[in-house]
Image (cartoon, rainbow, N blue to C red):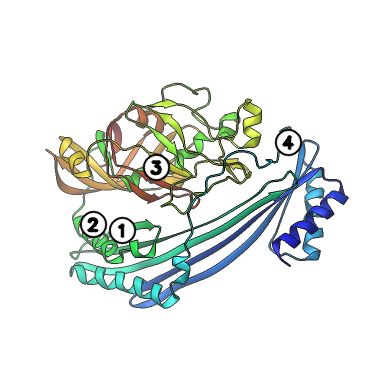
Amino acid sequence: MTFDEFKDRVFSVAKKKGFDHCQLHLDNTHEFEVMVCDGKVDRYKDARHLKIHFKGLKGDKAGFAVTEIMDEDSAGMLVEEAYENLKVVESPDKEFLHDGSGKYEDLKLYTGDFERLTGAEKIELAKKMEKVAKGYDSRIVKVPMNVVGHFGVTERIVNTLGLDVSFSNEGGYAYCSLLASEGDNPKEGFKAVVVKKPEELDVEEVARFAAEEGIKKIGARSLPSGKYTLLIRRNAFAQILGWFSVMFSAERVQKKLSPLAGKLNERIGVEKLTIIDDPHMERSFTSRPFDTDGYPTSRKRVVEKGILKTFLHNLKTAHKDGVTSTGNARGSGAGFMNIVVEPGLLSYEELIKSVEKCILIIDVAGIHAGCDPISGNYSISAEGFMVENGEITYPVEQITISGNILDMFKNISLVGNDTDLELTLNPNMLAYLPSVVVESVDVAGK
């Protein structure tokens, strides 16, 4: 049964069941990942997932159901399950479907180039990464993770109000994790990259970067506790900002689960800080022309020169606040598609030379447990290098940085121009941002 045949069947059954209007959301994903260790394939995933989400309206309420099968029986069971769910809905919020109005950008996001690579070719890329990393220096003692992967998605949303939109997107990634040692405790070197095209996947550079960083960490030590200036490299900044990005969700604000509640149109950061949601970035595999409500997406300044300009809305939260949806529905909530920080003027090297003394933070850990997006507080372990008189002097480890994310926004003194795509802890959102200098951060060390 084709999706159109399945859709017609579901809509017919839903009408007979008593739903006023209904919607189907097709989500067809392909995930590939291979990991190589000691020249052999250690993990191999080549999986396709099909999910069809049903939403049926009756009055102001909605019933939901999901299936992975398109046939006559599934159509009936999908509608029946949603109708039973509708009976127990207690939320006072009004539910909506979008009618397809608005401007949908014609984004060129899919070429199929990753799909055309054979499994053997992708395995060879991972093996090459390991070979380069191992051969970089005799102090590289183990290269346990050499990963190459790509992701593809096709989505289509259609409903009885006339909406019928679809798109496809894809992208690839690679990362290398290794251990470097001079006979003492081994230090990890790590590098990850996100690319749009296979030819952009330079696995040799990934390996060299990881190896060099692992070697530089040898001999790392802790620091005395105190307040320090931090230069947060963009990959670490992406992890922190990506985790806290949920506080911009209108749903969380309405439920008083965000430190931004009551701060719309107020200053929450320095003038140097502009945060943008850009769902149309062609380099990103999380870009999309419409959100999961089927509402058209748009590029928007969420924070402009330190001023909070908007929360991120879906149809339901927008109705509650008496505003228009921002096109940021993500499942049942709302969030960034791609979180972008507008760059400054200084290169990464110039940032280092501009600060007399600081800690260069190159990695953070414990984000899940140590960052609270309800209060904005964070306390996370970090590692990096001491910078003195504009020069990197020695590696630093076993430190914890802590504070509040809004204080971090207000204490940013420099913003770099070294913007690039970085992974976040949210698989549905990438970050495109630079490194930043933050003043007066509490650091706990020895």
Q: Mark 4, residues whose alpha carbon is within 10 Å: few (<14), some, or many (≥20)?
A: few
Q: Mark 2, residues whose alpha carbon is within 10 Å: few (<14), some, or many (≥20)?
A: many
Nearer the observer, 393 or 322? 322
Gap between marks 4 and 2 measured at Cα: 51 Å
**On screen, residue 110 above or below 240:** below
What quarter of the picture does the C terminus occupy? top left
Q: Which residue is denoted by mark 3 in the rendering?
A: 240
Question: Where on the picture, by quarter, is residue 347?
Answer: top left
Q: Which residue is denoted by mark 4 in the rendering?
A: 91
Question: Where on the picture, by quarter, is residue 90?
Answer: top right
Q: Secondary structure at mark 3?
A: helix
Say which label, 1 or 2, has the lower sequence index: 1
Q: Residue at x 48, y 37 (%)?
A: 373
Q: Which residue is denoted by mark 1 in the rendering?
A: 190
**Residue type pointed to by label 3:** Ile
Query: Where residue 106 sits in the image (x, y, percent)?
Result: 52, 49
Say which label, 1 or 4, has the lower sequence index: 4
What quarter of the picture does the N terminus occupy? bottom right
